[in-house]
Image (cartoon, grey):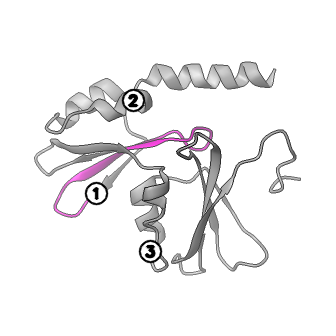
Amino acid sequence: MRYIVAASVALIAGCAGFPYGGYDIPAGTRREAVVARSGAPTRVVPLPGGGQRLQYSLQPLGQEAWMVDVDAAGKVVRAYQALTFENFNRIQPGWTMADVEREFGPPARVDGVMSWRGPVWTYRWRDIANADMFYWVYFDEHGIVGRAHQGMELHNGRDPGRR
């Protein structure tokens, strides 16, 4: 049964078209053409200089978040998959929640741990070896990144975050 549900989710996500074809949106494409092809973004975030970032996130169940940066004239500057090892490694102590959300979209989930005084955002992603991974971003009580790190997403076991 679990496999049928997973296959159904993958099929529905595949029908949306964008996450599996986002890499071939050429620079210069009009914003309207991106939305016509890919549908409404999950979120639109303003960028410095008057542009926008169209976020197409598959969180919480998916492992991709495609970003399409559009300039002030409404033309695509670049389109890329944000949830990568290289991109996560750009997160530094001092970043804000808004910085992280602008760069990666909404997290798969928000948790807390006893040894930390703020929320912990969890992103699901796949590493270069195609292994299922988590990336955790720890914010202090003021919404500032204190630390961040990756970890493996283990399957077929009890989720330690759920009781």
Which quadrant of the figure has residue 3?
top right
The crowd level at tag 1 (other Cα within 10 Å; few <14, some 14-19, many 20+) is some
The quadrant of the rendering that contains the N terminus is top right
Measured in 3D between alpha carbons, the distance from the residue under mark 3 to the one under mark 1, in whole angstroms, is 17 Å
Q: Which mark is residue 46?
A: 1
Q: Which residues are magenta?
A: 46-66
The amino acid beneath tag 3 is Trp
Q: In the rendered view, would you say 79 is above or below 72?
A: above
Mark toward the viewer: 3 or 1: 3
Q: Residue at x 46, y 74 (%)?
A: 92
Marks 3 and 2, the one that precedes in the sequence: 2
Q: Is residue 137 visible?
A: no
Q: In the rendered view, would you say 33 is above or below 97?
A: above
Residue at mark 2: 18
Left-right relation of 160 to 24: right
Marks 3 and 1, the one that precedes in the sequence: 1
Left-right relation of 100 to 5: left
Whether residue 31 is in magenta: the answer is no
Query: Which residue is situated farthest in the left direction here?
Result: 73
Q: In the rendered view, would you say 120 is above or below 60?
A: below
How far across and how far down the image is residue 76, in percent?
Answer: 19, 41
Q: Residue at x 20, y 54 (%)?
A: 51
Measured in 3D between alpha carbons, the distance from the residue under mark 2 to the one under mark 1, in whole angstroms, is 21 Å
Q: Residue at x 49, y 78 (%)?
A: 93
Residue placed most toward the observer, 20 or 98: 20
How far across and how far down the image is residue 100, in percent?
Answer: 45, 63
Marks 2 and 1, the one that precedes in the sequence: 2
Whether residue 50 is in magenta: the answer is yes
Q: Secondary structure at mark 3?
A: loop
Left-right relation of 87 to 147: left
